[in-house]
Image: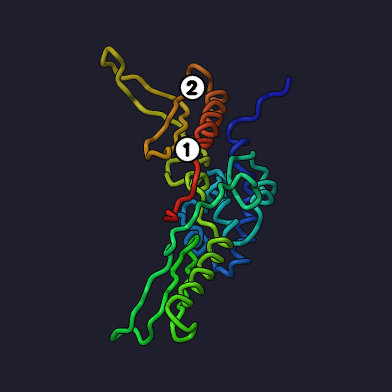
Amino acid sequence: MKAQRPIVDQVQSKAADCNQLLNEAITKLGLKNDAALAARLCVAPPIICKLRKGDLAFGPSLILRLHEEIGMSIRYIKHYLRLPSLPLLTKDNNDTPSLPALDEFYGIGRQEVSRNVKYAQWRVTLQRQGEAFRKSFRDDVYGDKDKSLEAAKAYRDQIVKNHLPMVKRDWVQIVRASTNASGIPGVIRVDREIRNNNDKPVRRLAWMAYCRTESGKNKQRLFSIRKYGEQRAFELALEARKAFLEDVKGYVLPLK
């Protein structure tokens, strides 16, 4: 029987592969060092250092950021780092939710002539993944107020079509806690002291899966390491997290 691979092998890439990918990211983005890369990826500088040493997993949050910043496909990044398949929604995935009908004036505002505005116009203002889209549509250019509004709507609709807002399932796949040593969002190792029924201190060791639901409440399940063992408890937490994600639908930004 094959020996089970330790947990660290399942969630971490080899340091050499990670270093090569990080170096490639620095080169492609035209950055000077790891500190600049950390700022670009919206993580603390020590995170990059831990990734290079192999002390921290290269999790879905950084995979997603690299995908957005560099343009590499997520499948390529994960294959390159020899990471396990994780439930991310991307442009490579047909599971993206359909876009609901937009409110008539979503992303569109009206500006009348004033001391600070020379022309009566409609203005489109949208932001996607940190990129801003702004454009004005003057009444005098398009003929009248209604025609300039039509042009603004057409531009707005094209931006929304080509730059979809982040789906909620991707949003909850971003690791935000610096204490998350697994590198997998929503899966953490619990090691703390609690009080039992007799009010005596007991050490709790477990892997926990958690996720914020549509209603804003948190779902969570713990799997005792003492009961299942380290490996099986970790695997059960991964399965529970994946099940939680099935109930996460829609987009992060409101479209109404």
Residue in view at x 56 percent, y 47 percent = 97
Decide: is 141 above or below 42.
below
| Mark 1 or mark 2, earlier in chain | 1
Question: Helix, strand, or loop for circle 2?
Answer: helix
Q: Could one spot residue 191 in this view of the protein?
A: yes
Question: Circle 1: is it few (<14), some (14-19), or many (20+) Cα within 10 Å?
Answer: many
Q: Is residue 35 at all visible to an observer of this figure?
A: no
Of 222 and 97, the residue lying toward us: 97
Q: Is residue 120 above or below residue 109?
A: below
- Amino acid type assigned to the residue bearing label 1 in the image: Gly
**Place of residue 189 in the rendered image (x, y in percent of width and height, measured from the top left):** 46, 32
Amino acid at circle 2: Ile
Task: Report the Cα–Cα distance between label 1 and label 2.
Answer: 17 Å
- Colour treatment of the image: rainbow
Q: Is residue 128 left or right of residue 116?
A: right
| Residue 140 found in image quarter | bottom left
Q: Which circle marks residue 186 in the picture?
A: 1
Place of residue 229 in the rendered image (x, y in percent of width and height, measured from the top left): 53, 20
| Residue located farthest toward the left when viewing the structure as drawn | 199
Q: How many marks?
A: 2
Report which residue position mark 2 lands on.
225
Query: Which structural element holds mark 1?
Result: loop
